[in-house]
Image: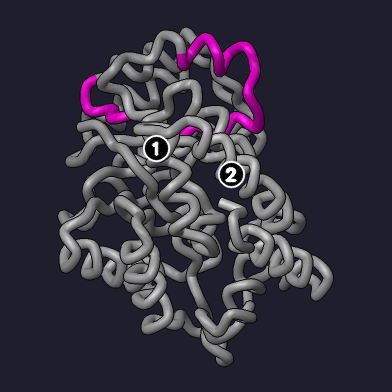
């Protein structure tokens, strides 16, 4: 399996009473697909999965799976934790409609790179669907070398990576230069998506695409098929929007913008997150307006 194109990690909208806003979530899923997304990601970090109850997580996944089945597009679902045994069970219980499982590098425990490799070896062997390894060292505390990333890519049933290294460094260059043609590398840093696509990423999983799905779908497409001058222009135009949408913890500003647009009922998030401030939301709305100004993209 090679995953290409734009996958949107959907927010989980809440009603005024704090419940999951199912209709709004379904609407968002259709909106991003109508705008050119290849597929969606359910229960990613942007969806606040750790702040949902088990029943709520099942409901969110069911809504996303129904939309993806209706639209005949792939569904990536986050599953697993920093514990190998728990992650194995979670993967075994995945909804059969899931196309691939997004599984994070074990966090907080700071295992050795050999331990990370063995963790994913066991998960890949047990999973009913291919794995997309979520490499995000600024959240996990575990940086992986290019050598380890390449060894992970060679494991059977590993489809690729959500690559969110927090920048483009020497290990990124080394990994991208060695990544096999059948390894999907999906850019996960919204601000650094364009340079990673320029290095050969096959697609992207971008939170900002909740807000501007058409622009981000075109960004991915332009870097893959050209023209490259347009790809650079789109990337440069979207950079201020990405910065504005991440001015406060994800997904608080995203939800503030979506609520201001009337696309979700409220900007509510759950503690320990707090709603984004008015200034941050206003700045993001201004950046969004500039993104879609005439000739901007």
Residue 22 visible to an observer of this rendering? yes
Residue at screen point 30% across, 35% down: 131
Residue at screen point 44% across, 17% down: 149
Q: Position of residue 214 (x, y in %)?
A: 44, 58
Is 23 rendered above or below residue 69? below
- How many marks the image carries: the answer is 2
Label 2, on which residue? 190
Is 107 rendered above or below residue 269? above
Mark 1: few/some/many CA within 10 Å (<14, 14-19, 20+): many
Numbered tag placed on residue 203 in the rendering: 1
Residue at screen point 24% across, 51% down: 74
Residues drawn in magenta = 156-176
Coloration mode: one colour
In this view of the protein, which residue sits in the foreground, 155 or 278? 278
Q: Is residue 150 left or right of residue 141?
A: left
Is 30 rendered above or below residue 186? below
């Amino acid at each position: 399996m090679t995953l290409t194109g734009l996958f949107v990690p959907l927010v989980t909208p809440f009603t005024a009473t704090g419940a999951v806003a199912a209709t709004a979530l379904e609407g968002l899923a259709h909106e991003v697909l109508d705008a050119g997304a290849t597929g969606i990601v359910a229960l990613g970090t942007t969806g606040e999965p750790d702040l949902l109850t088990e029943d709520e997580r099942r409901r969110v996944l069911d809504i996303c799976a129904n939309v993806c089945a209706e639209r005949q597009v792939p569904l990536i679902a986050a599953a697993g934790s920093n514990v190998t045994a728990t992650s194995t069970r979670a993967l075994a219980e995945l909804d059969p409609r899931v196309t691939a499982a997004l599984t994070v590098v074990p966090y907080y425990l700071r295992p050795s790179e050999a331990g990370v490799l063995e963790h994913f070896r066991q998960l890949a062997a047990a999973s009913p669907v291919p794995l997309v390894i979520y490499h995000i060292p600024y959240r996990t505390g575990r940086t992986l070398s290019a050598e380890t990333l390449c060894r992970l890519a060679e494991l059977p049933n590993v489809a690729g990576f959500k690559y969110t290294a927090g920048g483009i460094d020497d290990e990124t260059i080394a990994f991208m230069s060695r990544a096999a043609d059948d390894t999907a590398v999906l850019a996960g840093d919204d601000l650094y998506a364009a340079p990673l696509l320029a290095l050969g990423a096959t697609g992207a999983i971008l939170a900002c695409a909740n807000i501007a799905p058409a622009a981000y779908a075109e960004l991915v497409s332009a870097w893959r098929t050209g023209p490259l001058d347009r790809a650079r222009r789109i990337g440069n135009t979207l950079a201020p929007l990405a910065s504005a949408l991440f001015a406060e913890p994800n997904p608080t500003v995203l939800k503030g913008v979506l609520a201001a647009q009337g696309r979700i009922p409220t900007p509510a998030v759950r503690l320990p997150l707090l709603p984004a401030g008015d200034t941050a939301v206003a700045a993001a709305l201004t950046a969004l307006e500039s993104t879609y100004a005439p000739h901007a993209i």
